[in-house]
Image: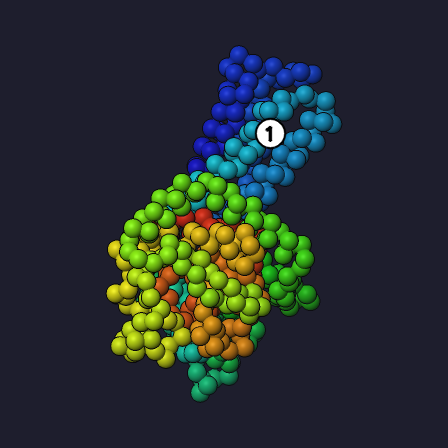
Amino acid sequence: MFDAAVVVVAVFGTQLFWLGPDHTGVSAAPVDYTTVSVLLCTAWLTALALWGTRSPRVVGHGVAEHRLVIAASLQLFGLVAMAAYLTGVDLSRGYFLLSLPAGTVTLLAARTLCRSWLGARRRRGDMSTRVVLVGSPEENARVSGEIARQPGVGLIVAGALPRGADDAPTWTDEDARQLQQLLEDVDADSVLVTGGGHLDAHDIRRIGWGLEPGRHHLIVAVNLTDVAGPRIHTRPVAGLPLVHVETPQYSTRQRVLKRAFDAVVALLLLVALSPLLLVLAVLVRFSGPGPVLYRQERVGQGGTSFGMLKFRSMVDGADARLSELLAAQGRDGSPLFKVDDDPRITPIGRILRTYSLDELPQLFNVLLGQMSLVGPRPQREAEVAFYDDDARRRLIVRPGMSGLWQVSGRSALSWEDAIRLDLFYVENWSLVGDIVILFRTVKAVVAPGATAH
């Protein structure tokens, strides 16, 4: 319904805006622009359907939905342009070129609003799939924890059928009866096989045979944590569902693209935000003695140190009291050097931190190539000392002003969660992902919630 409304408004709105209400004729064709608009709307909606943009497996999940919408729109207009050229129909270039971006951008905005609404409903437990976990207790607990961490994905763990090392090595009729009874008791829609518990391919097939077609669905959790969808490809070979996992690659093209994107956007932001930066500098100057800008040594790409710039949000000489405050709160041996209810923060600094305004000077670090707009959280040398071999992969890329840690909990994240999110970013970087994170960052800054300190 939303797609149809957006497409109709975009196409007919472009016709009225560009051509006016009286211009209807198309040269060398016995049709008018109203007929062309009707055909274009029909073709656009058909393309969205054929590309699977409304599939339940796609709607509300990741950036795949937006990618499909963009691909369907671009390819449709490519076909329309080819058809107009081959048939000699002289369509207005303005009508054609304006309706494409206007409709595509509005479609993406409408899908984003619908996704927000759907996510809110799912977090309340509505419009979600109730699943029963089947696997070893350890795997059931791992998958259940990941699902609970992201309530907006639309899965609710309704029950579990654990299979330990002492259970029968194969899936028996008694196991099937227990699973069917559990599905009925908890009113579950699907079975999620988490792995372990002596379950092989034949057992998973028998589980699927025991489910009611059209009512119950079978989901298999592949043991590939922190691997994004674009890196995973399935291909059946001789009856074997092979899963291909692309290794992370950081080509010269990708590095140049990311650096160019960072430099251009950072420069534009500095120009656009210059009045705000001036006002904030004045407020910080009158908040107490000390410099306006605070320079702190952080560890950057490849383990090299750099001076990260921030608006001063603490009293002068605050660093000298850090060890004392950490020891008083029993956190002097922890990897995250954060102080609860930090008394060193000035009143202006507390506001700056809540809305992340103190981090705006880091745009200069981005221009200098020391940081990126999006990347792993920049940490101090003492925090890097806690890294194991896995965590050191964070240093492959430049640290970021924002990142998955910024839009996934900020100060509420544990050390392990922050490292896990940063490693996920490093392993699955894409320019589209950076753009999505930046949009989510704006939302997190405007509505910071209780996790912003």
Q: Is residue 291 left or right of residue 203?
A: left
Q: Which residue does the image show at 49% across and 58% down from the upper left? A: 400
Q: Is residue 15 left or right of residue 414?
A: right
Quadrant of the rendered image containing residue 296: bottom left
Q: Which residue does the image show at 33% across and 66% down from the upper left? A: 317
**Residue 250 versus residue 43 in the image, above or below:** below
Residue at the extreme bottom of the image, as rendered: 166
Q: Which residue does the image show at 31% across and 71% down from the upper left? A: 321
Tell me how many marks there are. 1
Q: Which residue does the image show at 50% across and 29% down from the upper left? A: 10
**Residue 353 versus residue 238 in the image, above or below:** above
Residue at the extreme front of the image, as rendered: 289
Q: Is residue 64 left or right of residue 257?
A: left
Percent of width and height locating residue 252 = 68, 57
- Answer yes or no: is residue 53 visible: no
Callout 1 secondary element: helix
Q: Which residue is mark 1?
A: 97
The image quadrant where one finds the N terminus is: top left
Percent of width and height locating residue 389 = 54, 77
**Residue 273 versus residue 386 in the image, above or below:** above
Residue at the extreme top of the image, as rendered: 22
Percent of width and height locating residue 386 = 46, 77
Instruction: Give amino acid for label 1.
Output: Leu
The image quadrant where one finds the C terminus is: bottom left
